[in-house]
Image (cartoon, rainbow, N blue to C red):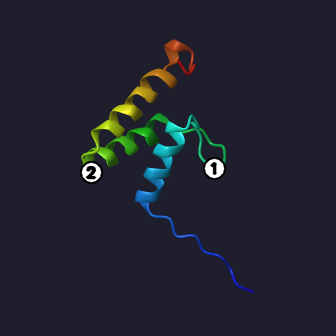
Amino acid sequence: MSKKFKLKSYDFLMQSTLERVKGGLFFDKSFKPYTVDFLSKVIDYFESHERYEECQYIKNVIDTRLNHEKNYKNI
């Protein structure tokens, strides 16, 4: 009986998170919503790799989607 192991790196996590957010999915594969803290880590990751367009995209998601004053609506 063989077990399947999944090796996922931090890079894979950040890339897949970006793709899910760009696809309109604001939660992970176990349906837990992304937090502002986690999305800030995604911004830090892409900033360290000098991918500023992705940083701006995630920042816009935080400012619009996760804004209490806008009632957490996707505007």
73 to 18, vertically: above or below: above
> For this view, does 30 lie left or right of residue 1?
left
Task: Give the quarter of the image for residue 60.
Answer: top left
**Residue pushed farthest right?**
1
> For this view, does 1 lie left or right of residue 40?
right
Kind of residue sitting beneath label 2:
His
Residue drawn at x 59%, y 40% is 27
Please give the residue where the numbered disc 2 appears in the rendered image.
49
Q: Position of residue 28 (x, y in %)?
A: 59, 46
Kind of residue sitting beneath label 1:
Lys
Residue drawn at x 57%, y 19% is 73
7 to 67, vertically: above or below: below
Residue drawn at x 44%, y 28% is 62
Q: Secondary structure at mark 1?
A: loop
What is the spatial separation of the Cα atoms under label 1 and label 2, in whole angstroms? Answer: 25 Å
**Closer to us: 2 or 19:** 19
Please give the residue where the numbered disc 1 appears in the rendered image.
29
Q: Position of residue 6 (x, y in %)?
A: 58, 70
- Sort mark 1 into few (<14), some (14-19) or many (20+) by Cα contacts within 10 Å: few
Count of number-bearing discs: 2
Q: Secondary structure at mark 2?
A: loop
Q: Position of residue 34 (x, y in %)?
A: 54, 39
Residue drawn at x 45%, y 64% is 9
- Sort mark 2 into few (<14), some (14-19) or many (20+) by Cα contacts within 10 Å: few
**Considering the image in quadrants, where does the N terminus appear?**
bottom right
